[in-house]
Image: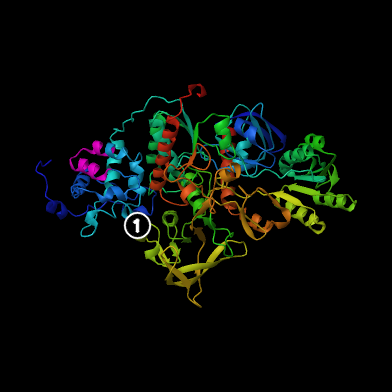
Amino acid sequence: MNNIVSAIFLAENIKKIEIHAPRIAKKRKAGQFVMIRVSEHGERIPLTIAGSDPEKGTVTLIVQGMGKSTRELNLKKEGESIHDIVGPLGTPSHIENFGTAVSIGGGVGTAIAYPTAVALKEAGNHVITINGARTKELVILENEMKAVSDEAYITTDDGSYGFHGFVTQKLQELIDSGKTINYVLAIGPIPMMKAVAEVTRPYGIPTVVSLNPVMVDGTGMCGGCRVTIDNEIRFACVDGPEFDAHKVDFKNLSDRNRMYLEEEQQSVEAFSHKCQLGQQK
Amino acid sequence: MDLKPMTTKERLAIPRQPMPAQDPKERIRNFREVHLGYTPELAQREAMRCIQCKDPACIKGCPVNIKIDKFIKLIAEGDFLGAVRKIKEDNILPAICGRVCPQEDQCEKVCILEKKHESVAIGNLERFVADYERETGNVELPEILPATGKRIAVIGSGPAGLSCANDLARLGHSVTVYEALHQLGGVLMYGIPEFRLPKDIVQAEIDGLKQIGVEFVTNTVVGRSVTIDELMEEEHFDAVFIGVGAGLPWFMGIPGENLLGVYSANEFLTRVNLMKAYDFPQSDTPVFDCRDKNVAVFGGGNTAMDAVRTAKRLGAEHAYIVYRRSEAEMPARKEEIDHAKNEGIEFLLLMNPIAFIGNEQQWLTGVKCIRMELGEADESGRRKPVPVKDSEFLLPIDMAVISIGNGSNPLIKQTTPEIEVSRRDTIVVDINSMATSKENVYAGGDIVTGGATVILAMGAGRTAAKAIHEKLAGQAPDFDNE
């Protein structure tokens, strides 16, 4: 059992949760994730670590309520606990002074792009961040991203805040302006990561994405998180989760992530029903 | 008991006592254990079959040299608790080994009776006394030697780690076991199904270790959460035993392996055993809904049998084993193969998959196979399967489980590079002590041998415990580390 030290909503349905886990807090590096189980009968789900405080012994997760487990996690309040947390898992982000590095976060992916942006900044890069969301209310970590950026951009799909359009349009604009970009990191929904890969491919800009396949153990045992990289099987839990975006078979990833769609819906419906009953009490 | 000793002739006249089992028609609808266990009467009668050889071959056939003749004699005399204690001098987990050891290739294979009669059912007897001890509430805490002040970290709570931890704790050392998963037991929990090894038995063994002072820490991945160097330098462990088991599953490298519905055996079994996916949605983890579907498991080992029988219990209409050699070459225990056959598992032998076929939504719909025939013997001594020309055919299936073995977990190698590994990434040890190339670090089980058996892992854990004890005993105790 691990205590929740703080839990606050950053946007509708997106919660920032700080969990007591001293070993993980001490060891974790940008790009790594934890596996958590919210309750006794819970699934093991991977969540990328958004930050940590080694002194306090806490790690921070930023969670969007999507399936049953993430919704259940988002109901947790300060002082409550989660059943299990293990990590840090996965290979840390490859960080060096590339020159100019662009860190792109789409939606809750910004929570993962942020720690890598911090690491890129610390390594001496000229850091450009593009923080994309569907609409203004869903923009998260605006100040944090700004603080680590030499140039910070916000994009919204509906134009309600910042640049009107997708992160890829902003990225294209930066490339077209003649700026030399040496490295791009993109984390967000699969279509966004795929689109970013296609923007940078013609220019040969090294581009890295963080993949989110379904996992079970997350420690290099079950093989469920296999992804296709350069036509070969790789395991996101130990070989990743970050991979060369130009080599990722995104279609295979999104296909495989549909595997339990029906079961997920069934769980979410049952869970929502239970929650409603709980409120009526 | 009849005090007059039985003659050998009388003993040989007793037939091998069959193990009572759940009816196959019944058991494919539940996950309860297949075998029901001997009654005391059956056990005693079986034990009387042992002719008490002067130089018992069975003991040499046992990887941990259990004093088999002696424990069987005690059973014949009706001293069941005496018998289990005799076993425990050499094997701390008889309830588990009595169930999952391949006795037919070890002790029972070399039993003198095997040639003319059937061998004594040593495994069934081991299991009986272990269950008797537990079920009658007679499990005794072993004697623990005075505390040595030495601290040992055991990485992995599977069979190798548990046996190593047990021996070290009994010798008075302070032992902490680290487990990566949220549940203790390793492959005994996530891999071997309930119907072959009930989980409450594994739990009882772990509880026994807790009672003798072994500490367990779950959710800790050594290599990630903490490294071996940190355990030794910062947390002051005097020695480390690595028993992390096998790693990532192998795939076949044929087209379509990433289609929806294709699993590794590790993933399929972990979902069902560890995560209790058979109980979805009460348990949150789902697994492919096998009901009325066709499932094929590729491979011929015990894990393949576990997977295919699990699929059958989850409601599969056809559950196939697809294996490229013939039944004679199958590595699975004969008992498991027989159980599978009785349960209606269909064996498609001398067949090899060439490609998985899927529909537009990328769900698996079938597998293209080719028939094989046996050619010359290969390095393993088994006749090598070669494809029969123009014999391809399509087998319609909805789910596939690939069960062709595992590689090694790369984490220890990545984070403790001075530990020497083989080309296959298994850890290299001195087989007499299980010592690795790093001072005071030992290893055993599948991480050393590649995929092997529970009893071999336990034997390795015990060998390492002995070596660790001898090494540390030469050093002054340092209680200030506590």
- View extreme (right): residue: A177
Nearest the viewer among B126 and A97 is: A97
Scheme of image coloration: rainbow
In this rendering, is residue B127 above or below B207?
below
Q: Which residue is mark 1?
A: B339
Q: Is residue A166 left or right of residue B86?
A: right
Q: Main secondary structure of the magenta part?
A: helix
Q: Is residue B284 above or below residue B321?
A: above
Q: Residue furthest left?
A: B4
Circle 1 crowding by C-alpha within 10 Å: few under 14, some 14–19, many from 20: some
Q: Is residue B47 left or right of residue B211?
A: left
- Magenta region: which residues? B67-84
Residue A50 screen position, x and y as percent: 69, 37
The percent position of residue B474, horizontal first and vertical second, equals 43, 30
Type of amino acid at the residue the image marks with label 1: His
Position of the N terminus of chain B, as image quadrant, is top left
Q: Is residue B120 above or below residue B443?
A: below
In the image, residue A45 lies in the stretch drawn in magenta: no
Chain hosting mark 1: B
Residue farthest front in this picture: B474
| Label 1: which secondary element | helix
Q: Could you tell me residue A9's position as x and y percent?
A: 70, 33
State the residue in front, B425 or A109.
Answer: B425
Using residue A30 as the reference point, say whether residue B456 is left or right of it: left
Residue reaching furthest to the top: B480
Any part of residue A211 in sight: yes
Question: Is residue B75 in the magenta section?
Answer: yes
Q: Nearer the viewer, residue B241 or B343?
A: B241
Image coordinates of residue B371 in percent, x first then y, are: 47, 72
Residue B459: image quadrant is top left
Residue A82 can be seen in this image: no
